[in-house]
Image (spheres, rainbow, N blue to C red):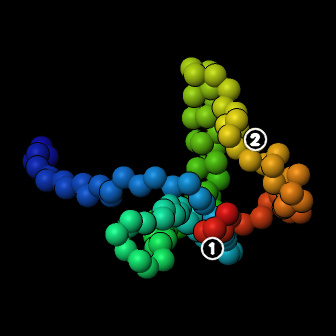
Amino acid sequence: MSEEKKLNMSISEGDEFFAHELSINFNPMQFTFDFKCVTPRVDARSKEAPTIVAKHNVVMTDPYHAKQILSLLKNVIENYEEQYGKIEKPSAMKEFEKKQKKKGKEPKNKTRTPSYFG
C-alpha cells in the first residue's frame, strides 16, 4: 500500500503589468515576446527635461508553445467578442491616423516595429 505524502507549494506571482507596446523576435530555437510600458514622468517643480520610463517584461518560449499561445489568444478573443461585441480600433486612434495621413506621415511599412516614441 502506498504511503500518502504531503507537499507544500509556494507560487510566486509577478507584479501586474500594463503593456501598450509589444515586439516579438525569434531565432531557430525560441520566440521572444518583449512587453513594454513607456510612460513619461513629469515633475512640475523640476526644471529638468521630462523623464521617460520604459519597463519591460520579456517572455521567451519555444516555437511550439508560441503557436499554442496564438491558438489560445485566438480562442479567448473569439469568446470575448461573443460576449461583448466586436473589438474595433478606438475612434481616437482612427482620427489620429487620419491626421497623420493628411500630414504625409503614414508609415510605408504597415508591419513596422513599435518604437518608444511612436
User: What is the number of callouts on the image?
Assistant: 2
Between 96 and 48, the one lying in front of the other is 48
Say whether disc 2 or disc 1 marks the residue closer to the N-terminus: 1
Tell which tag, 2 or 1, sits nearer the viewer. Answer: 2
User: According to the image, label 2 marks what residue?
Assistant: 94
User: According to the image, label 1 marks what residue?
Assistant: 29
Q: SS for tag 1?
A: loop
Q: Around disc 1, counting alpha carbons within 10 Å, would you say few (fewer than 14), some (14 to 19), or many (20 or more)?
A: few
- Cβ atoms at labels 2 and 1 below 8 Å apart: no
Q: Amino acid at mark 1?
A: Met
x, y percent for residue 47: 41, 77
Q: Which residue does the image show at 42% across and 66% down from the upper left?
A: 42
- Left or right, residue 41 beside residue 70: left
The circle on residue 66 is: none
In which quadrant of the rendered image does the C terminus lie? bottom right
x, y percent for residue 58: 49, 67
Q: SS for tag 2?
A: helix
Q: Which residue does the image show at 70% across and 44% down from the upper left?
A: 93
